[in-house]
Image: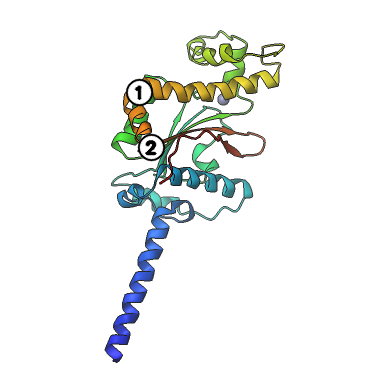
Amino acid sequence: MKFNATKSLIVAMASFLMCLWTFNTVHSDDANVALTKEAQAAITPAKALEMLKQGNKRFVSSKLKKRDILAQVKQTSKGQFPFAAIVSCLDSRIAPERVVYQVIGDIFVATVAGNFVNDDILGSLEFATKLVGSKLIVVMGHTDCGAVQGACDKAQIGLLTATLANINPAVNAVRGEYTPRTSKNDKFVQAVTEMNVKLTMQKLRDRSVVLGEMIDKGEIGLVGAMYDVSTGMVTFYEEATTRQP
Ligand SMILES: [Zn+2]
């Protein structure tokens, strides 16, 4: 009897530890544990979005736990299994990993002034999702974007002219009574910023057959977002293309 009781206790403890391990590995936002292949596979696109939302909530609430970043460096030294990819602006006020409370090996980040996509970035996103298994792509614009302001003003300077040209479709697509249609008009700039996120999402689906198919099959999600440089808050757009698990 005593042996059976001890055995039951050991089994119960093992089950508890297994649950704890699973919780920690899947919820990497709350532990110094890098994602494993199994933990990444268990995350749905909707779950990935929820993890980013919760991460930003923690970021703005300042309830940041001490992280052992070097531990995650060691854990990921043999491989990476990030659960999401973020396309963000170059702006120094945005640190994508930080604002969604993720660290080493948790998410991919592609940054370019004006958070647009071209073939190089789309190819990188195909790598992040099709080959490495990330479940969600976020196109994240931000308030007070200098690149968008430059595009609104039709700024011309060196190679930056060609970079800003990627935002021109958004400038041209914004209709309505915006006067002036320059960086002096904050409402116009914000409207272009939001349009740029929308058009970037559309281009991502249309231009990349690989990503478009994965989104259509529900294998990955695609969502737009806006980062507020004055509050640290990320607003995820309602028209998220994420299917429920
Ligand atoms: Zn910007």
Quarter holding residue 222 = top left
Residue occupying image coordinates x 63% and y 21%: 191
Disc 2, SS: loop
Q: Which mark is residue 233?
A: none
Q: Which mark is residue 220?
A: 2
Residue occupying image coordinates x 38% and y 40%: 135
Label 2 crowd bin: few (<14), some (14–19), many (20+), radius 10 Å: many
Q: Position of residue 153 (x, y in %)?
A: 62, 11
- Note whether residue 51 is visible: yes
Amino acid at the residue labelled 2: Ile
Mark 1 — residue? 208
User: Sequence order check: which comes first, mark 2 or mark 1?
Assistant: 1
Q: Nearer the viewer, residue 35 or 68?
A: 35
Q: Is residue 126 above or below residue 185?
A: below
Amino acid at the residue labelled 1: Ser
Q: Position of residue 242 (x, y in %)?
A: 44, 38
